[in-house]
Image (cartoon, rainbow, N blue to C red):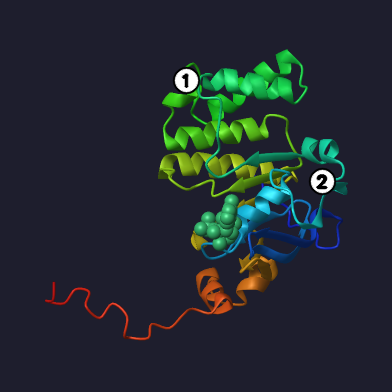
Amino acid sequence: MQAPAPSPDPTAPSAVSIQGLWKHFGTQAAVAGLGLELPAGAFVGLVGPNGAGKTTTLSMVTGLLRPDQGTVLIHGADVWADPVAAKARIGILPEGLRMFERLSGRELLQYNGRLRGLPGAEVDRRAEELLAVLDLAGHADKLVADYSTGMRKKIGLAAALLHNPDVLFLDEPFEGVDPVSAQTIRGVLKRYAAAGSTVVFSSHVMELVEQLCDWVAVISAGRVIAQGPLDTVRGGHSLHEAFLELIGVREDDGQALGWLGGGDR
Ligand SMILES: Nc1ncnc2c1ncn2[C@@H]1O[C@H](COP(=O)(O)OP(=O)(O)OP(=O)(O)O)[C@@H](O)[C@H]1O
């Protein structure tokens, strides 16, 4: 049986340190002074309602979108001042990942491995292991263009893990993934985290976050409104209940949609 992941030490230096992060789109502040400290070795769930700013935050934290203001450190390396050092330590599975569609799954991993500066033989060894563990060995020579949604998530995850990063960021890794593939992805992530690496993923599925994560950050309107160990954030309730409470669920005023489902057409 696999050993449980060691609990993160909140006093250890942060794996990810975000301070005063801002991003405007036109006049709208999508991320509004967001701050976050994530301990090394934590399995972090980033939750928040639609439009809260999770994807925008992850894009800025991983060097894909330039912030208006603020700093992001990955194990002390500044993502925007020292991108080469910071990016060497991270793996990313973005939402709606665009990939080289005319490469096969195996070629995509070989290409990514060489980009990361790994020796060819090591890339081949790791790629074959990842393809096998993620149940993609039988599809390794198929073009990525012909992969299903779940297969795309899995090959994207393999590409993000190939250089064995210290911190892995995943935006909605389970969206559109069937239960079998989800189980495979969960297994790989747990194994990765059990070895002391840090995982940060966004999700709307509270049950999944409760199952996997030992650390949670709740984002609303571009800010962090709660962060800490899972048990502290949910405070004796389910995460679902705590989330609704923190966000402040809007009451139905009883007036809207009065026509819906009635006899009036
Ligand atoms: N490129 C863009 N141009 C304009 N507005 C944007 C852009 N990207 C995001 N936004 C806006 O910023 C806000 C935050 O969006 P973001 O995608 O970060 O939220 P999210 O928490 O990931 O949402 P969801 O859970 O629905 O994926 C939203 O109001 C969104 O409309």
Q: Along the polypeptide, which appears first: circle 1 or circle 2?
A: 2
Task: Give how far across and how far down residue 122 sits, in percent.
Answer: 72, 18
Q: Quadrant of residue 168?
A: top right
Task: Give how far across and how far down residue 236 sits, in percent.
Answer: 59, 77
Determine if the C-beta at disc 2 is less than 8 A from ligand 1: no
**Residue type at the position of mark 1:** Leu
User: Which residue is drawn at the image coordinates 55% and 72% (left, top)?
Assistant: 243
**Residue type at the position of mark 2:** Trp
User: Which residue is drawn at the image coordinates 48% and 44% (left, top)?
Assistant: 182
Residue under pointer 2: 80
Camera-side residue: 112 or 174? 112
Residue under pointer 1: 143
Residue at the front extreme of this rendering? 26
Q: Ligand 1 lies in which image quarter?
A: bottom right
Task: Give how far across and how far down residue 174 sits, in percent.
Answer: 50, 47
User: Which residue is drawn at the image coordinates 13% and 76% (left, top)?
Assistant: 264
